[in-house]
Amino acid sequence: MTDPTFRPRRSVLYMPGSNAKALEKAKTLPVDGLILDLEDSVSPDAKAQAREAVCAAASSGAYGRRELTIRVNAADTEWHADDLAAACAAGPDAIVVPKVDSAEAVRTLVDTLERHGAPERTALWAMVETPRAMLHAEEIAGASERLTVLVMGTNDLAKELYAEHVPGRHPLLTGLSLALLAARATGTAILDGVYNDVKDTEGFLAECQQGREMGFDGKTVIHPGQVEGANAAFAPSEQAVADARGMLEAWEGGQGSGVVTYRGRMVENLHVETARRTLAIHETIAALHADG
């Protein structure tokens, strides 16, 4: 029941492009995806060197099954054009662009990728991190088939809202929900934002659970110690897998008999679709790990 179109993104780790040890360590981490960063984690005087290192890493083929992306600097910076040209030549799985806040910005980026000869397999990931982006999230997500993932930039969103970082993230919930609605309306994947306190494991896991319950596909993380928690939170639990199998068995065994129930609950088509999706995700993750 594996889904060949599904790619797990339970954990997507930002790695500073100027840190050679970090780029090397990333080859061994149990992470679904990597964002090799040229933006926030790289000082201005290290941008050019980091660009060279990140593009070499992206084209090396040394990262196995991990989805490999490059985050360029934003369009209003002096490094953006050179970053995009180099990233297109490197041909990663995706290019991540910060502060995308309109459909026109997406179309411009796609045109630039095509002009620079980026391989067809190189997708565009758009970071949505401003009030304007929240209010235009559906237009952004639907602007191009090349845009496959929305990435929440919750730190910048909080800054733009003059909001505080608090447990439960209630100041950000409207924006998170608007972006989620846009992603699901357009068939786009969506990743939750980062959790800043790498020593607060309890808070991190609580936020992972919240993101999973809301419907995010996975979480961006900033420290290798957060990877395992995100992987566990955004994969179907053993109980969810067992319930999905039991529900499908009940459905298949009870077809034609009228009402079908599982554990005392009525089973309808929508429950069957959810159960099949749960098993497809579980089996795809298992198959990927079996392949190493």
Image: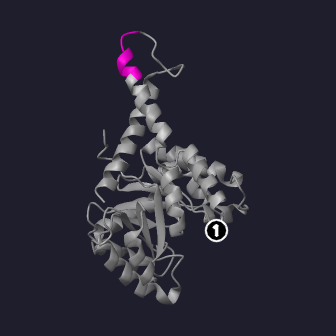
The number of callouts visible is 1
120 on left or right of 201: left
Q: Is residue 253 magenta?
A: yes
Looking at the rendered image, the quarter that the C terminus falls into is bottom left
Pinpoint residue 109: horizontal percent, then vertical percent. 39, 65
Relative to 45, residue 177 above or below: above
Colouring scheme, one of rainbow, by chain, secondary structure, one colour: one colour
Q: Is residue 268 magenta?
A: no
Q: Amino acid at mark 1?
A: Lys
Q: Quadrant of residue 201?
A: bottom right
Query: What residue lies at 48% left-to-right and 47% top-to-bottom?
Result: 183
Relative to 38, residue 100 above or below: above
Q: Which residues are magenta?
A: 250-257
Relative to 201, residue 174 above or below: above
Q: Main secondary structure of the magenta part?
A: helix
Relative to 19, residue 195 above or below: above
Q: Is residue 19 visible?
A: yes
Q: Which residue is mark 1?
A: 199
In depth, the one of 278 and 170 nearer the eye is 278
Looking at the rendered image, the quarter that the N terminus falls into is top left
Q: Is residue 6 visible?
A: no
233 on left or right of 253: right
Pinpoint residue 221: horizontal percent, then vertical percent. 53, 64
Query: What residue lies at 68% left-to-right and 54% top-to-bottom?
Result: 169
| Disc 1, SS | loop
The local crowd at label 1, few if under 14, some if 14 to 19, many if 20 or more residues have their Cα within 10 Å, is: few
Query: What residue lies at 47% left-to-right and 66% top-to-bottom?
Result: 13
Q: Quadrant of residue 51?
A: bottom left
